[in-house]
Amino acid sequence: MSSLTQHKYLPSFHHQVCTKGKFVHRIRVYCSTNTTTTSTAVKSKTNVNQLIIEPKLAKPPIKVVTDANHPRDSDTSLQSTWSHRAWVAVGCTTLLISLGESIKGSVDTNMWVEPILAGWVGYILADLGSGVYHWSIDNYGDESTPLVGAQIEAFQGHHKWPWTITRRQFANNLHALARMVTFVVLPIDLVFHDPIFQSFVAVCAGCIMFSQQFHAWAHGTKSRLPPLVVALQESGVLVSRSQHSAHHRPPYNNNYCIVSGVWNEVLDKSKFFEAMEMILYFKLGVRPRSWSEPASEWIEEIEIASQSQVQ
């Protein structure tokens, strides 16, 4: 019995983002047995399942963008329109009405603890809601999906160019959620006047509406963020930059919550989203995007300055 070792180098076929140019070393091993029979006249060798070791040395591609091929600050898709500003103004108005109802009811009834606790619950559940929504549009649907198709398309683009969210103007970034908040909260303002319920609605809906701004801050650099925002991130009140950055690394299936991020560890360790994906797959036969190799629109492109900017 003897063993033969053969080395064969093959190119890698693996999607991966690389920012530091490191090599990935993977080895594929096949078991083998070689049988040698010796006689006085003939020596024969029968090779069964050769042992082949295939080291695969691959340098993952570095994708960079320059001034010529990345979204510019002057891109109209990053700028606010009067329609965007109007929806944000209306959304903020509905939130202020809800908050005012809560304060007025608390003053009239001299009840403060319950509304404050209700607001805290709203804040906690808003983070959970942002995670569930973020997971759903990251993994299912496309630009043709009714109601949320535009947001699905935007989030796919966000994975490719995550830094552009810091360049979106305020109303451009918030108008879609502001519109949703308006349609949900305005009827509540007209029908319900309980201070506890209104406190919950005001804080929960407010955190959801501004979650995209919290998200943008999570992509900002510390030196460029307001000190108050940095303090809130570091204290865990808002989702931190380090926590959210993990969401933009393969396999892109964790840290979905973007309000405070308090639910991220719980959901990821319990594999909540993986369980939901299995249920949807077995019930509906729909595969989430996170099960597949990242498509080109998911591979982050790293922004670099062009030569004209450097000089």
Image (cartoon, grey):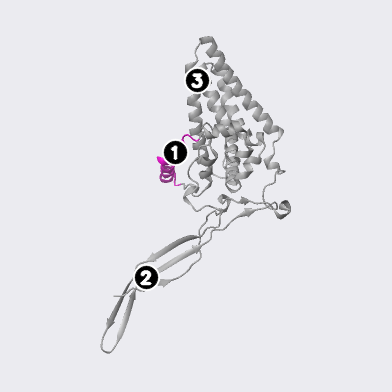
When asked about the image quadrant of residue 206, the answer is top right
- Magenta-tinted stretch: 261-285
Q: Is residue 266 magenta?
A: yes
The residue labelled by disc 2 is 51
Q: Is residue 151 magenta?
A: no
Residue 29, how many percent across, how many down?
A: 39, 65
> Can the viewer see residue 137 in this picture?
no
Element at label 1: helix
The residue labelled by disc 3 is 116
Nearer the observer, 304 or 108 = 304
Residue drawn at point x = 47 percent, y = 64 percent: 56
Left or right: residue 25 versus residue 46 is right
Nearer the observer, 77 or 6 = 6
Instruction: In the rendered view, tell whether residue 182 sits above or below residue 156.
Output: above
Residue 80, how many percent across, how many down?
A: 69, 36
| Mark number, residue 194 | none
Q: Amino acid at mark 2?
A: Leu
Element at label 2: loop
